[in-house]
Image (cartoon, rainbow, N blue to C red):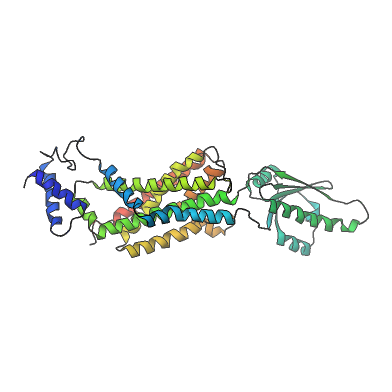
């Protein structure tokens, strides 16, 4: 059999022929390797062909994978439209957070609060959590960021209350709560000038709004679902249908197949990112991007690699699509909750926050939040990206230990 006859046979087996053609294609591919590429200049798929004639496998495979996704309306819905519906739903529900309980920082001695009886403190605790701090500047910065809802201090007979303008409900709650305490303190002085007066003012609006953590959180969940599920299920399907085995025998190199898959998944992740930002920055939701918001692009790329490595590990450990999907679900859903994708972890128990530090999705979510809406820059993004790339390297090395070309 001539080289010209073996080349199309090899391409045919790579495209998915079955039965006896598998062995013929394997023999043809092996013959091509032994021949060293002689006389194959006219064969565009042969390894020994010239770079000018040989098609770019990464580009062609990427194009094929992308077209297969675009032709599947169900995949488009669940990977692109469904996550956006979650953002629309949660963004609308939590657009105005009406939580009544407030967190107040007490700077120095405040006689009107320090003199409360045990019963009065119990009543106050139902509406507010008062934390004593010593540094006014640091406490005020935390009010701006939303860590505290208000700051209270006393200068002579004047009690000074400073609160964030971001949440009118909590601001009103802080004023009403402190006014009630002052009225009790002034009750004994009826008929005389009030012993204590309240001076309230707003601070700059730098507190965290729901859309600021909903956008990076739900975006991270969407990227994780796409990267982990699609990678794991694709790997299992290719192995079960013996396509991996055929690719191994074909002129296509293994790294070219992996590069094509990464390119397709990266394109999907960046498309998801663009859609989330387009919706969240609408005036109705009001997400305001900070100056270095573009750093979310490399963050998403590094996060996608980390999450894809988990998908490859799952695909290497499982044998059927059902078991791969189940294991992926068992991993992605808890990881999404424990990484702050659906709600902020600021008030979560300590053990929950400790567990979240072991999950790559946390770093994607927190890194994206920092650069999108909290003024973060390279100093915030670079360590996060480095950590996700290190995670990718470790999991990929573990995947190589369990990877199989066939079902044996």
Q: Nearer the viewer, residue 120 or 57?
A: 57
The residue at the point 33 percent across, 58 percent down is 233
Task: Point out the residue furthest to the right here.
Answer: 191
Q: Tell me, yes or no, if residue 324 can be seen here.
A: yes
Task: Point out the residue furthest to the top here.
Answer: 52
Q: Tell me, yes or no, if residue 359 can be seen here.
A: no
Q: Nearer the viewer, residue 121 or 284?
A: 284
**In screen coordinates, is 352 left or right of 123?**
left
The residue at the point 64 percent across, 49 percent down is 146
Residue 384 % position (x, y):
47, 45
Residue 178 % position (x, y):
77, 54
The residue at the point 54 percent across, 56 percent down is 89
**In screen coordinates, is 185 left or right of 225?**
right
Q: Quadrant of residue 385?
A: top left
**In screen coordinates, is 345 left or right of 172?**
left
Counting labels gives: 0
Residue 162 % position (x, y):
73, 46
Residue 285 % position (x, y):
57, 48
Q: Quadrant of residue 231?
A: bottom left
Task: Point out the residue furthest to the left here.
Answer: 1
Q: Quadrant of the C terminus?
A: bottom left
**In screen coordinates, is 234 left or right of 272?**
left
């Amino acid at each position: 059999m001539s080289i010209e006859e073996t080349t199309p046979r090899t391409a045919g087996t790579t495209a998915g022929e079955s039965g006896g053609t598998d062995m013929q294609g394997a023999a043809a591919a092996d013959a091509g390797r032994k021949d060293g590429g002689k006389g194959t200049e006219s064969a565009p798929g042969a390894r020994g062909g010239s770079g000018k004639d040989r098609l770019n496998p990464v580009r062609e495979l990427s194009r094929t994978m992308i077209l297969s996704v675009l032709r599947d309306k169900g995949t488009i819905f669940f990977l692109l439209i469904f996550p956006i519906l979650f953002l629309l739903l949660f963004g609308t529900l939590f657009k105005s957070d009406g939580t009544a309980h407030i967190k107040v920082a007490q700077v120095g001695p405040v006689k009107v609060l320090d003199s409360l009886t045990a019963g009065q403190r119990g009543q106050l605790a139902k509406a507010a959590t008062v934390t004593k701090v010593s540094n006014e500047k640091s406490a005020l910065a935390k009010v701006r960021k939303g860590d505290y809802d208000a700051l209270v201090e006393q200068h002579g007979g004047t009690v000074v209350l400073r609160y964030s303008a971001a949440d009118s409900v909590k601001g009103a709650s802080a004023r009403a709560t402190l006014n009630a305490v002052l009225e009790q303190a002034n009750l004994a002085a009826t008929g005389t000038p009030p012993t204590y007066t309240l001076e309230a003012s707003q601070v700059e609006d730098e507190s965290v709004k729901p859309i600021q953590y909903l956008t990076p959180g739900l975006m991270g969940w969407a990227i994780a679902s796409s990267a982990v599920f699609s990678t794991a299920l694709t790997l299992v399907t290719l192995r079960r249908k013996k396509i991996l085995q055929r690719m191994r025998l074909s002129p296509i190199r293994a790294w070219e197949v992996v590069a094509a898959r990464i390119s397709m998944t990266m394109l999907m992740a960046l498309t998801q990112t663009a859609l989330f930002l387009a919706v969240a920055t609408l005036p109705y939701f009001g997400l305001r991007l900070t100056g270095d918001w573009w750093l979310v692009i490399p963050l998403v790329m590094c996060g996608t690699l980390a999450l894809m490595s988990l998908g490859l590990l799952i695909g290497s450990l499982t044998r059927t699509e059902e078991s791969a999907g189940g294991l992926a679900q068992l991993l992605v859903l808890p990881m999404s909750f424990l990484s702050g994708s659906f709600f902020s972890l600021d008030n979560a128990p300590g053990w929950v926050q400790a567990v979240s530090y072991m999950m790559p999705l946390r770093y994607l979510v927190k890194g994206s939040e920092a650069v999108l809406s909290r003024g973060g820059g390279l100093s915030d993004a670079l360590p996060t990206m480095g950590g996700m790339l290190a995670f990718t390297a470790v999991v990929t090395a573990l995947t190589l230990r369990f990877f199989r070309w066939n079902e044996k």
